[in-house]
Amino acid sequence: MNNNRFYLNTYKTEKNIRAERINFCPEAALDSNGGIGCVFVIFTDDYRRSCLCSNIMARKIFNKVYEILSTTVITIGVILVIIYLCGIRLYHVKSGSMGELLPIGSVCFVSTYSKYENIETGDVISFKVDDDMLVTHRAVRITGAGIYTKGDENNTEDPDAVTKENYIGKTVFALPHIGDMFIFFRTTAGKVSIVTALLILLIMGRIYKMNDTEENGEING
């Protein structure tokens, strides 16, 4: 038996019913006399409208998701730019010397515009100990030699005073538990994830524009 399928495209209208395709299927559509039967694929106007509405709904959902994602990314980017322009620098907390104020994994926002001369006892400041190490502790006393600091959970003061040369800025606020995310984004896997996410967003943007063009065409049509 021939297993090939034969298709004949035909169009006819009768009582708002359109036969789009007649599918001849010898192996599946034999009549009682052994002859070749016909399988009609019928689409009514209601079915067409249902499919059209489903497609439009799917586009709207996709477009809404894209708009939310793109708005979120742009908003975060704008906030980070504004923060940077305001002299705020972000630092990851790696030790628990400041206790609940700055738990491990926090990100502290340090204002580099806060002048060294304006620091008072009780302020939390950030400073460099060496080229690879930065410390954020509380100012406990100020003398002519500099600002002496101590971690809230430490029993003793830091041995060296903070001077204008190694002073970075004053900690204005902190966000807990997001420091690990910053560390991840600095790794190779994190960078690959960022690039992949941006590519996906760009592709979604292209599809979004195509959907928008098609919807405008349907409306104009």
Image (cartoon, rainbow, N blue to C red):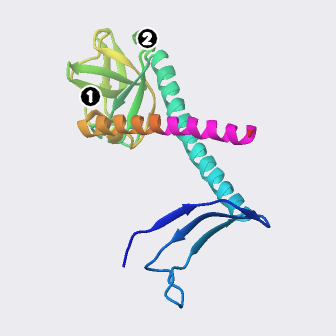
Q: Secondary structure at mark 2?
A: loop
Q: Is residue 215 magenta?
A: yes
Residue 39 visible in image? yes
Viewport quadrant of the C terminus: top right
Instruction: Determine which residue is flagged by label 2.
Output: 115
Instruction: Determine which residue is flagged by label 1.
Output: 157
* Figure check: 44 above or below 76: below
On the image, the x and y values in percent for residue 186 come to 28, 33
Task: Locate residue 69 relative to residue 46 in the image: left or right.
Answer: left
Residues packed near mark 2 inside 10 Å, few (<14), some (14 to 19) or many (20 plus): few
* Figure check: 163 above or below 218: above
Q: Secondary structure at mark 1?
A: loop
Q: Residue at x 20, y 18 (%)?
A: 131
Task: Locate residue 164 relative to residue 47 in the image: left or right.
Answer: left
Of 2 and 201, the residue lying toward us: 2
Of the residues shown, which amino acid type is indicated by label 2?
Answer: Lys
On the image, the x and y values in percent for residue 119 come to 43, 16
Q: Quadrant of residue 185?
A: top left
Of the residues shown, which amino acid type is indicated by label 1?
Answer: Glu
Task: Locate residue 43 relative to residue 121 in the image: left or right.
Answer: right
Q: Quadrant of residue 12?
A: bottom right
Residue stretch rendered in magenta on the structure: 204-220
